Amino acid sequence: MLLAKPDVSLLDHLAEVTRLGATLADRLKLPEPLRQKVILACAFHDVGKATEDFQEYIRGRRKKAYPHALASLPFILLAEGLLNQQQGTDRHALEATGAVLTHHSPLGARLYLGYRGSRVTFHESLYAFLTELWDLLARYGIGDLPSVSEFWHSLQGLLQSAPADLLESVLELGAARHSLRGLLRLQQVERFARVKATLHLADWLASAQQPDPHILFLRNGASAIGRYARQLEGPLREFQRKAQSVSTEKVLWLRAPTGTGKTEALLLWAGDTERLIYLLPTQATTNAMWRRLRRIYGDDAVALAHGRAAYMLRIESDEDPLDARLFGSVFARPVVVATLDQYLLAHLHGRHWEERRTLARCATIVLDEIHAYEPYTLGLLLEALRRELPARLALASATLPESLLQLFPEGYLVEAEEDLWQRRRHHVQLRKGSLLEEGMQQARNFAHQGRRVLVVANTVADAQALYEQLQATGLPCTLLHARFAFRDRQHKEERVARPRPGSIFIATQVVEVSLDISYDVLLTEVAPIDALVQRMGRVNRRGDNPSAPVLIYTNWSEGARRIYGQDVLERSLEILQTLPAEPTDEELARATHRLYEYVLHTEAWQQELQEGRQTLDELQRILGCYTIDLTDEQLRARFTTRRGMISVDVLPQCYVQEALQLKEQGEGWRLPELLVPVPVYWLIKAPDAFEELADLQVRQTGLPYDAERGLRLTDDWQTRVEASIL
């Protein structure tokens, strides 16, 4: 008997994967020709395990075997050619061939190059096995292929060549000639992605011992959010009911002030969707939403996808980390909470792009905090949506400028009711002077009054300087910025969520979209209006108290000028000067719109937007059906979803011994706890501050670090690198 696994016959495995693939093809609403391609791919994907060396390997008599996906190539290539004749489709449409060949490896120009000239020998029972496989195909509606004997006769010619050599065989495509490898790159992207994604999902489900494909789809989502909404205080707000009532709309635009139930409105609109992908700007906001949606839809239904998802799953979930990470990373759970980067990397053809794009295409996608992205990222997003609009799309923000909305597909606008916009939560005071000097003294005064004080600086260096000066006074202070180790940052976020009276929280822009906090008073350096509105949303968050003091210091630092630009800061200050002392949420939203009207029409903003669009367009045209090769320097330079502040993780020297001990104890997965993100250009401008730590496959840095102040630049290093954004 031919084996697929030590305890599973090859025929049983192929039958199970084919059953799952057929069900998934139906659930994903694949057209019949593609459904047949999926059946074919599932039935043939592991035929290459019928080699003598694989059967020896699976029985423990060999240490390695010839790649079975490559050994399957002659079979699927011939079978798909016959199916194309039967369907009357293009004979060069080889979606199933590409899917089978790459079900363990990304499709690319170097795939299996090392196996050229290497032939394989198939097991003597292969013909009898194919006879049984033909019965399996007939059960799923593919019964018009030639007989097994005819197939066998045609197959002999292909088996005379090494499978890898078939990839270099030349085929005609119109007036052009391409190798089979090149022809696979030129397949219709959507068709190839859908066939490969369905095969992959079916194979993973079978291997993960979860043979029910329906676990990949959300059941009774409207009931789940309805139960959750009934547990909240008071009835639904008018705009939440409105969002629920327009659930048939394909595109929703939602604008509602902070703390009024925007998330609930979005979920009510999503209703009974079978797939929900909720995209947010940062890992911190994504983690918080993941916890929240698990309470609504259940732990098993909700996945997390971002750069540190594997770590979070080990810490906070009882699931098998491998299965949970795999299904989450490819958007295969019913509900996926992810950073926008994960969605965009799929459109830049990162690993497993086929699954993510296929599943996103038939999902309800929520883009929350849409205001938070720079123009390059927005350009990537707009181009991705232009090419592949999901089944349903929602854009949401407390500050959703009309000029920004016009860039996106036209939607049905739902706004919070008028009384919610008329809240006056803040008393705004423009103060001459700088945050570092006049602001520090005022922060002390507020703290002595027992106020919980939030101080927001525009650069890490300024925030660290404020912390050191205020801490020296003996007041309880906490500092948070982006250059803390993950573990230390988590501890700080927990601490600042429950501030004591008289405490001071000094932060950078990390508070704008990352933390659900509410303080009594805000002191901040002038910044763009949209950033200031987000900062103001962290004091008197729900408007339950009298207007909270907001002191905005009008002398900005050199670091702020480099980050935001002189013209944006000047325009923001002009707009601030037109606001009343106690602006309503509506007046703050309009102020944001005024700034966007200016910024979106600047040459620099438009240029970055177009660069994002162009990057995605060029990469997709270059790659076709290939997965991006990150060893190619030119391609790697384009494989980024952000501009300006690209970061890399480094390990402070003070944590090196702890990191090595974790590895020795078999807990190397905890290494992310100790890593600190730094701007990538630091490594270029100050290379001698960093060195490779081969044992941990990470860079260590000798820059000073402690858990209270984070990573710091000494005076010597300060002159060698510029101030960064966070």
Image (spheres, grey):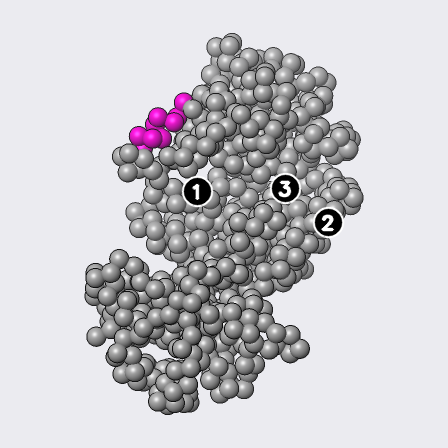
Quarter of the picture holding the C terminus = top right
Q: Toward the viewer: 357 or 454?
A: 357
Q: Single out the mark in the foreground, 1 or 2.
A: 1
Q: Toward the viewer: 173 or 681?
A: 173
Residue of label 3:
643
Number of dots carrying numbers:
3
Residue 47 locus on image (x, y percent)? 34, 73
Task: Check disc 3: other Cα within 10 Å, few if <14, some if 14-19, many if 20+.
Answer: few
Residue drawn at x 46%, y 70% is: 165
Residue 613 locus on image (x, y percent)? 67, 54
From this view, report whether residue 705 is shown above or below residue 527: above
Q: Look at the magenta stretch and give its main secondary structure.
A: helix
Residue 71 locus on image (x, y percent)? 38, 70
First in residue order: circle 2 vs circle 3: 2
Disc 3, disc 1: CB below 8 Å?
no
Check residue 403 in the rendering and tell me which mark sits there, or answer none. 2
Residue 542 locus on image (x, y percent)? 54, 36
Does the magenta segment cover residue 588?
Answer: no
